[in-house]
C-alpha cells in the first residue's frame, strides 16, 4: 500500500501553513497507524525536503504523545523491515497503514474519535 498517494500529497498543506492555528483547530489530513503496536500519526502539514517527505503532526506511541516532525521514509522503512521479517516471524499487524477512510477534520475531532475507539477496544478486551 502506498503511504502517500498523489491525491493526498496534493491535499496536505506545506509545513508551517497552520502555524497560527491553535493545535486543537489544526486540520488533520492523514492518519497513519500500526494496528497492533500502539503507534498513530496524525499529519497536519507536509512537504518534500532534501529528498524526503516531512510531516508535521501529532504522534502517539507507547512512550507518550507529542506534536512534532515525522518522515515518510521512516514509515516506509518500518514496512520494509516488516516485509523482510515476514518469512521469519509472524509480523501481522506490525506495518504502517494509511487510514484510507480518514476524512480531513480538526485535530480535536480526530483525537476525540481516536480516544473513543481506544476506550471501546479496551472495554471489549476486558469482557
Image (tube, grey):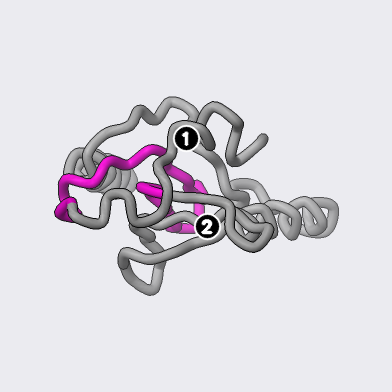
Residue found at x 60% / y 30%: 6
Query: Does label 2 or label 1 sit earlier along the sequence?
Result: 2
Residue indicated by mark 1:
99
Residue situated furthest bottom in the rendering: 63
Identify the mark at residue 54; answer none if there is no mark.
2
Q: Residues within 10 Å of mark 2 (few under 14, many from 20)?
A: many
Name the element at disc 1.
loop
* Left or right of residue 2: residue 65: left
Q: Can residue 123 be seen in this view?
A: no
Residue 111: assigned label? none
* Residue 2 versus residue 55 in the image, above or below: above
Which of the image's four quarters has the N terminus? top right
Residue 82 on image: x %, y %: 72, 55
Give me the residue at 77% from left, 51% from top: 83
Q: Judge the density around disc 1: few (<14), some (14-19), many (≥20) Cα neighbours within 10 Å.
A: few
Q: In terms of depth relative to the viewer, which is nearer, 108 or 127?
A: 108
Seen in the image, is 91 located left or right of residue 63? Answer: right
Residue 88: x, y in percent?
83, 58
Q: Is residue 39 magenta?
A: yes
Name which residue lies at 35% across and 28% down.
103
- Please identify, in this view, whether the residue under mark 2 or under mark 1 is nearer the observer: 2
Q: Is residue 1 visible?
A: yes
* Residue 11: quarter of image: top left
Q: Looking at the rendering, in which quadrant would you find the C terminus?
A: top left
Q: Would you say 33 lies left or right of 86 here?
A: left
* Region of the chain picked out in magenta, as a range: 21-45
Q: Does the magenta stretch include residue 124?
A: no
Amino acid at each position: 500500500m502506498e503511504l502517500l498517494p498523489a491525491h493526498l500529497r496534493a491535499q496536505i498543506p506545506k509545513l508551517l501553513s497552520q502555524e497560527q492555528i491553535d493545535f486543537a483547530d489544526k486540520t488533520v489530513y492523514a492518519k497513519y497507524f500500526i494496528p497492533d503496536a500502539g503507534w498513530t500519526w496524525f499529519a497536519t502539514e507536509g512537504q518534500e525536503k532534501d529528498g524526503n517527505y516531512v510531516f508535521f503532526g501529532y504522534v502517539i506511541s507507547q512512550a507518550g504523545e507529542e506534536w512534532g516532525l515525522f518522515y515518510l521514509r521512516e514509515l516506509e522503512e518500518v514496512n520494509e523491515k516488516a516485509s523482510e521479517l515476514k518469512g521469519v516471524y509472524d509480523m501481522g499487524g506490525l506495518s504502517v497503514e494509511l487510514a484510507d477512510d480518514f476524512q480531513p477534520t480538526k485535530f480535536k475531532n480526530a483525537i476525540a474519535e481516536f480516544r473513543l475507539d481506544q476506550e471501546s477496544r479496551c472495554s471489549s478486551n476486558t469482557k
